[in-house]
Amino acid sequence: MDLVTLNVRMAWPVLIFWLGFMLSLLWFLINNHDVRLIGMLVFAYLMATVCFAIEVRIAMKRLLGLLRAGSAGSGLSI
C-alpha cells in the first residue's frame, strides 16, 4: 500500500476576501463593542472551514478513485 500526501489551500482571491471580511468584522467589534459581532466572526470562520473541509473530502475521493482505476488497468505501480 502506497501513501499519498496532499497539501491543499484555499484559492488566493478567496483567502484574501475571507481575511478582509474577518478583519473588518474584528475592527467593527473593537470599535463598537457589539457582542453580536463575535457570533458573526465565529459563524464566518466555521462556514469557511467546514465548506473547505467538504471540498477537500470530495477532491480526495475523486483523486483516490482515479489512482485506483489507473493502477488496475495500466499495469503501472503507484
Image (cartoon, rainbow, N blue to C red):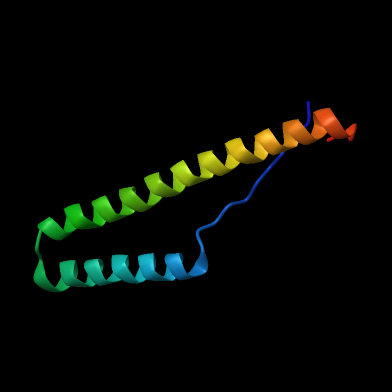
The quarter holding residue 71 reads: top right
Residue 60 drawn above or below residue 8: above
Viewed as shown, does residue 25 lie left or right of 50? left
Residue 36 drawn above or below residue 63: below
Residue 9: x and y in percent read 54, 56
Viewed as shown, does residue 42 lie left or right of 14? left
Residue 17: x and y in percent read 38, 70
Q: Which residue appears farthest toward the top when viewing the image? A: 1
Residue 48: x and y in percent read 37, 53
Residue 51: x and y in percent read 40, 47
Q: Which residue shows up at 74% across the image and 31% down it?
A: 68
Nearer to the camera, 36 or 1: 1
> In what quadrant of the picture does the C terminus appear?
top right
Residue 40 drawn above or below residue 3: below
Q: Which residue shows up at 32% across the image and 48% down it?
A: 46
Q: Which residue shows up at 78% across the image and 25% down it?
A: 1
Specify whether residue 1 is in view.
yes
Q: So how many labels did they put on this image?
A: 0
Nearer to the camera, 29 or 12: 12
Specify whether residue 77 is in view.
no
Viewed as shown, does residue 15 lie left or right of 59? left
Nearer to the camera, 17 or 27: 17
